[in-house]
Image (spheres, grey):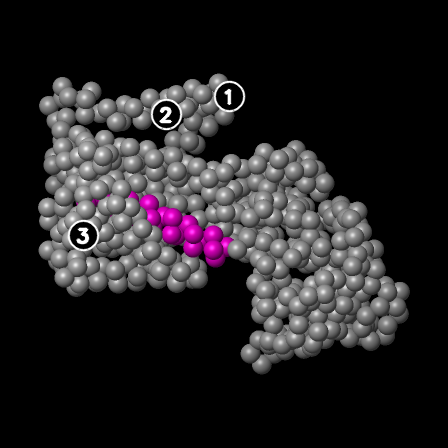
Amino acid sequence: MIETRELRRRFGGINALDGVDLSVSEGERRALIGPNGAGKTTLFNVLTGELGATGGQVRLAGSDISALRPWQRARRGLARMYQRNELFDPLPARENVRLAIAASRGAYRPLSSVARADASAADEMLDGVGLAGKGATPARALSHGERRQLELALALARRPRVLLLDEPTAGMSPTETAKIADLIASLDRALTLLIVEHDMDVVFRLADRISVLHEGRVIAEGTPEQIRGDTLVHDVYLGKAVPM
Amino acid sequence: MILRSVRLAALALAALALIAFPQWSEGWESSRYATSILRDILIFAIFASSLNLLVGYAGLPSLGHAAFFGGGAYAAAIAAQRAGTDNLLLSLGAATVVAGILAAVIGFLSVRALGIFFLMLTLAFGQMVFAIAFQATDITGGSNGFAGVRRPELLGMDFNSADALYRLVCVVFIAVVLLLWRVVSSPYGRALVGVRENERRMRALGYDTRTLKFSAFVLAGAVAGIAGGLSAYAFRFVSPNDVAIGASITGFVMVLIGGAGTLAGPIVGAAVVLYIERVLSSSIDFSQTVLGVVFVLFVLLARQGIVGVARGAVHRIAP
């Protein structure tokens, strides 16, 4: 469903992505792990088109999207949950989601009215991510956990085919982490997920397969069991104790 | 529903009262003077409202907006003086189209830049338009400008008398406000607010934000051109001052004092600024200083402007 071939991105003299080959099939839930600086967020930015690739290809559902701009990729069904929330802070949660829903119909209707159906669809979407009753609350007045839930709702609103989740549990309490992991686990199985996550419990719970990124390359790939047993992965990532 | 109807009725009454101002103020000693001030307030309210679409809704701080106001004023004057048409639709149409085309050219290049760079680009393009107006003497009359611009006519109505011109300005003003009200409450207007709040997220949602900003820039430019055309009729004079940085800044000040991102804000702002500049200046010598102080106070203490502050107060009293 989403695939990269020899994907490269250089920053000055540094190869942030040094020929990444990745192939995630439809409905698969793939986790992407690796130490800080391995290139995970750069990979996401190149996949969505926010950063240009310096080489290689990105393919979505079989077609090359490397030359498309970010909004065109979104229209092809690629969505992203950002690591740091990208919300419309002063706007009510409902309007945040409504903007996401209305995007599929195009914005050039300067003389028509806002569809009531979109507002109720937005409320349903909010219910779905556990934000029932929060529709009128400005995004900036929500708690951190709720903001992550809203961020997820924005990513889901266009009914994407591929969803990139960049550290969905970043900065969350254990309760909030469990809640968002439950939400992700309960998503439609037809949706293809690519998840960057540092919390290994969450990774092993959600992922069908895991790819390990190190210095801009995929150094290992397999089922959670295989990755757990991989000595190379242990050396570069899992085995290292979390710095205290 | 009832509240909505009452509101609509009140607005319709206000519109009628506005159009009939010269009649019901007839008894006043200064009725004619007041009418001319009100006319100019409405013209500048159109200008400030168009700028507000950029500054207040789309989050595009343009400092070159007078280029379109002045462009419209020149187009209307040239249509009458050089092309020899007094037809209102042709003349005001030329003002709108010329300003819109100018905005398309400047906007195409400017909306690629963000924040302070966008501001500097619009400022630079505004100065270029000013230089052209100043130096292309054959077309624009250079520093002398155009004096004695003829007022237009339409279907046998001529807008030469002060009252007729006032009514014309009123009707155009009401039409523009209705149009902008439609636009900002449409999915398009909401998308502009989305761009203002988080352009990156809008792109990730599938909005072509550059085209959104460009179209808003052209629309705002065309509406500013209408205001410019009306000002050419009102003052019967067009000069490089109409495209100068001073006019751009005046528009910006009106938007900020009145309340950016609200429909009523720029209208209130235009009224306050013109009151200080025109009325207060006849009784005190330092009216420009007053304007400066008012502006500083709003920027420091009440960035949401007069309309924003008033809304907040109403909310506190009756939530």
State the extent of the magenta-drawn residues as a range: B209-233
| Magenta stretch: includes residue A4 | no
Q: Are marks 3 and 1 in contact (CB under 8 Å)?
A: no
Confirm whether circles 2 and 1 share one chain: yes
Q: Nearer the viewer, residue A229 or B32?
A: B32
Q: Are marks 2 and 1 in contact (CB under 8 Å)?
A: no
Give the letter of the chain under mark 2: B
Q: Position of residue B194 (x, y in %)?
A: 51, 47
- Residue at figure coordinates x 32%, y 24% from the top left: B14
Give the amino acid at mark 1: Met
Q: Position of residue B265 (x, y in %)?
A: 35, 37
Q: Position of residue A160 (x, y in %)?
A: 69, 52
Question: Against A66, is B281 above or below?
Answer: above
Q: Secondary structure at mark 1?
A: loop
Q: Position of residue B233 (x, y in %)?
A: 18, 42
Give the letter of the chain under mark 3: B
Q: Nearer the viewer, residue A222 or A233?
A: A222
Q: Which residue is disc 3 drawn over?
A: B83
Question: Is residue A151 shown left or right of residue B59?
Answer: right
Question: Is residue A71 shown left or right of residue B266?
Answer: right
Q: Are marks 2 and 3 in contact (CB under 8 Å)?
A: no
Question: Mark 3 or mark 1: which is in front?
Answer: 3
Q: Which residue is disc 1 drawn over?
A: B1
Query: What is the C-alpha distance between the residues marked 3 and 1?
Result: 51 Å
Q: Is residue A167 visible?
A: no
- Residue at figure coordinates x 10%, y 55% from the top left: B144
Of the numbered discs in the image, which one, if any, rests on residue B286? none
Q: Residues within 10 Å of mark 3 (few under 14, many from 20)?
A: few
Question: Is residue A192 shown left or right of residue B186?
Answer: right
Q: Residues within 10 Å of mark 2 (few under 14, many from 20)?
A: few
Q: Which residue is disc 2 drawn over?
A: B11
| Magenta stretch: includes residue B222 | yes
